[in-house]
Amino acid sequence: METFQSPLKQQNIGFRPSTVMSGHERVVRVAFILLDHFSLTTLSTAMDALATGNLINGETIYQVSTYSLQGGLVESDIGVSLASQRLVAEGFSHDAVIVVGGQRVRLAAQPVLRRVLKKSSGKGIVAGCWNAAFYLADAGLLETGDFACHSDSCGLLYEYFPQLKVSTREFICTQRRATCANAHSALDMTLAIMQELGAHNDAPLVDEIKRVHQSGHLQPKTADSLRCSAIPKPLNIALDLMEKNIEEPLEIDAIASQVGVSRRQLERRFARYLNAAPNRYYLELRLTRARQLIVQSDRSLTDVALATGFVSYPHFYKRFKDLFGLPPMTFRDYYYANDYASSGRYAVAASF
């Protein structure tokens, strides 16, 4: 089986079946504590990052549980209720504990929550979203540094904890304490937690999760190993031409001509900045698009082949199998197989 040579590897390596459920993955247990009228957007943002981490098959499995003070259904800020387990201090043990606040959450000391956070602080990361920093402060866990909190709740925190310092930053993750000020920054906070607790080799995949959740279409030159600020303009133009001509690929000579350099000059720049020849990068870009179409649509595989510039299905079949380890149809079936969807990698959704 061939390997990706260009920075597009980070967008695809997690989908290769050789890394799926080897039995040696690191398991990270994450508990979300939902306060009454918690921000549903904040929770879904954080959980989606973990679910994507499971989806792209790194060396870490994130298993998620939801808790609340009373147990049962907890109403979110928009009236949608989610199931939860009742929070008790005895036997509570997780690698990360994330308290989810929100605009409509009323802040008041909760003895059980205080005990849980104090106990958890010695074992893993303790985090608070939106205004949940209040509960970390109440447990005495924010004495040694700045923390993030939504601006609407800063006044109350100043009143109860005048010695503490609220940061102007939207999220902070340091010394196994993490806080974020709003739903948008919950993604960055969760990714920081994943980098802290996940396997060392998953670090590049965390960057890929961030790319997945950012707006905009695929831009290969934003890949992790690209030195974007140093990429010369002709190479950027060549990348854009490739991106815009997937279905009917251009000849490399034609790209070089439009860019205004010789083919040899273009090849040297691809080798220097992308670690791949132009035709190889172009192939990997087209197969990346093919993988997306196979996973995200029900288009026939012949249509996928044509949409990604392959003049014959047998040629597409061979090149796709070379890089992803499975034929296109088997890859689609494998990706959506019931036993895979219900495996430990999807435990993140089990509590719903």
Image (cartoon, grey):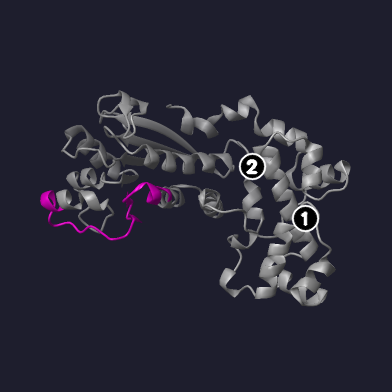
Query: Which amino acid lies under the numbered mark 1 shown in the image of this protein?
Result: Leu
Query: Which amino acid lies under the numbered mark 2 shown in the image of this protein?
Result: Thr
Residue placed most toward the observer, 260 or 24: 260
Percent across and percent down for residue 219 are: 62, 58
Would you say the residues marked 2 and 1 are in contact, meaning their CB atoms lie under 8 Å apart? Answer: no
Residue 290 lies in quadrant: top right
Q: Is residue 139 left or right of residue 252?
A: left
Q: Is residue 125 left or right of residue 233?
A: left
Residue at (76, 39) in percent of width and height = 326
Q: How many marks?
A: 2
The C terminus sits in image quarter: top left
Q: Is residue 26 left or right of residue 238?
A: left
> Which of the marked residues, 2 or 1, is nearer the chain's N terminus?
2
Instruction: Judge whether residue 167 is colored magenta.
Output: yes
Q: Is residue 252 left or right of residue 70?
A: right
Q: CA distance from mark 2 to mark 1?
A: 23 Å
Q: Which secondary structure, mark 2?
A: helix
Residue at (16, 52) in percent of width and height = 155
Percent across and percent down for residue 51 are: 50, 39
**Disc sitting over residue 283 in the figure:** 1
The magenta span reads: 158-187
Q: Which secondary structure, mark 1?
A: helix
Quickly name the residue at label 2. Answer: 19
Judged from this view, the residue extending furthest toward the top is 72
The answer to whether any part of residue 5 appears in the image is no
Mark 1 crowdedness (10 Å alpha carbons): few <14, some 14-19, many ≥20? many
Residue placed most toward the observer, 82 or 275: 82
